[in-house]
Image (cartoon, helix red, strand yellow):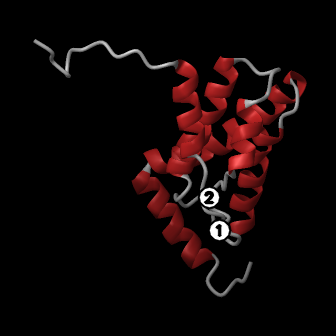
């Protein structure tokens, strides 16, 4: 008797990678510096890049997905910091060859690390937000 819970299903890894990449595509929000906006063309560029291995493409998509999940967290009073992190992290989608991969991944890792620490330490992050609110009262960035 067929049991859908125990049945072996064979799904191609490339199909999973393509779906993961497509799930990163967001509607462009021009003034939202706290998110990494990914366009379909950028996902396609990574998928069609012949110099990157499957493992490298997977790493790019997985880390970008995590950054999207954590990107709503508070990281500082000055929005230019978040804007700069997202701008640098998005450079991973401009990779043309393997020589650019390591540098772009470092930038993505830095942004992910900062946002992940903020997300995984909600008490400390809220305390920092409240301190910054008092510290920068009346300051326009």
Instruction: Please tell me which residue is depicted at 66% across the width and 64% down the height of the picture.
Output: 28
Instruction: Tell me where residue 140 sits by quadrant.
Output: bottom right
On the image, the x and y values in percent for residue 111 come to 67, 45
For the residue labelled by badge 2, is the local secondary structure a helix, a strand or a loop?
loop
On the image, the x and y values in percent for residue 10 come to 40, 15
Badge 2 density bin: few <14, some 14–19, many ≥20, Cα 10 Å: many
Residue on which disc 2 sits: 35
Q: Is residue 79 left or right of residue 88?
A: left
Residue 52 lies, with reference to residue 71, above or below; the image says above
Instruction: Please tell me which residue is depicted at 49% across the width and 57% down the height of the picture.
Output: 125
Q: Residue furthest bottom?
A: 138
Residue 11 lies, with reference to residue 82, above or below; the image says above
Residue on which disc 1 sits: 29
Quadrant for the C terminus, please.
Answer: bottom right
Q: Residue furthest left?
A: 1
- Whether the residues at callouts 1 and 2 have beta carbons within 8 Å, the answer is yes
Q: Earlier in the sequence, mark 1 or mark 2?
A: 1
- In front of the other: label 1 or label 2? 1
On the image, the x and y values in percent for residue 106 come to 75, 33
Q: Is residue 129 left or right of residue 38?
A: left
Return the residue nearer the eye: 12 or 26.
Answer: 12
Q: Which mark is residue 83?
A: none
Quadrant for the N terminus, please.
Answer: top left
Return the residue nearer the eye: 63 or 125.
Answer: 63
Instruction: Please tell me which residue is depicted at 58% across the width and 43% down the height of the picture.
Output: 22
């Amino acid at each position: 008797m067929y049991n859908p819970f125990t049945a072996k299903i064979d799904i191609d890894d490339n199909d999973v990678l393509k779906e993961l990449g497509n799930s990163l595509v967001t509607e462009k929000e021009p003034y939202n510096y706290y998110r990494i906006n990914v366009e379909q063309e950028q996902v396609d560029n990574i998928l069609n890049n012949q110099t990157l291995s499957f493992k490298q493409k997977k790493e790019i998509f997985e880390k970008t997905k995590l950054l999207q999940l954590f990107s709503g967290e508070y990281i500082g009073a000055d929005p230019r910091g978040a804007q700069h992190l997202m701008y640098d992290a998005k450079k991973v989608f401009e990779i043309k060859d393997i020589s650019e991969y390591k540098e772009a991944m470092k930038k993505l890792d830095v942004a992910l690390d900062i946002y992940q620490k903020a997300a995984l330490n909600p008490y400390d992050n809220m305390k920092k937000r409240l301190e910054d609110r008092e510290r920068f009262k009346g300051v326009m960035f």
